[in-house]
Image (cartoon, rainbow, N blue to C red):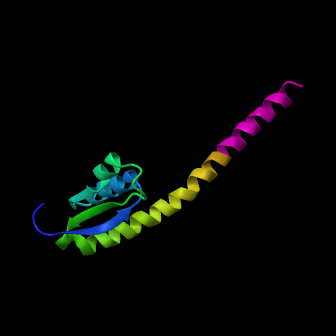
Amino acid sequence: MSGGLVTVGEFGDQLQAELFQVRLEQEGIKAVVVGASLLAEMPYAGMPHIDVQVRKEDEEKTKAILEMYLDECDANAGEDIGDEDEDDDEVADAGDDAVQGGQ
């Protein structure tokens, strides 16, 4: 990428940084993940610090996308727990039906 790069997101998790990179590229913004290779070489160096960088001219558009991305991550974080509970309830209900049907 030509031009100056700016950091638009700092992540403690390589997967989250790479997912954000993919999201940006879906929006037509080239992005790079910086720091992931260092984390792989020195996994016990402390808290991971992985940056996502874009061209300076894409910075403002990227900030809006980052805000939406983080909101989606927060919303999805709560869904995983709730979905598992609902599945467990369905299995329990199916088990109750089987027991009652056998009597």
Magenta span: helix, strand or loop, mainly? Answer: helix
Residue 61 picture location, percent across and down: 27, 72
Asked whether 95 falls inside the magenta stretch, the response is yes
Question: Is the residue 6 above or below the residue 89 in the image?
Answer: below
Residue 78 picture location, percent across and down: 58, 58
Say which quadrant the C terminus sits in. top right
Q: Is residue 61 left or right of residue 42?
A: left
Quadrant of residue 99 in the image?
A: top right
Q: Residue at x 51, y 57 (%)?
A: 76
Question: Is the residue 28 above or below the residue 83 in the image?
Answer: below
Q: Which residues are magenta?
A: 86-103
In the picture as drawn, the residue positioned furthest to the left comes out as 2
Question: Is the residue 93 above or below the residue 52 in the image?
Answer: above
Q: Residue at x 61, y 49 (%)?
A: 83
* Nearer-the-camera pick, 86 or 41: 41
Residue 11 picture location, percent across and down: 38, 61
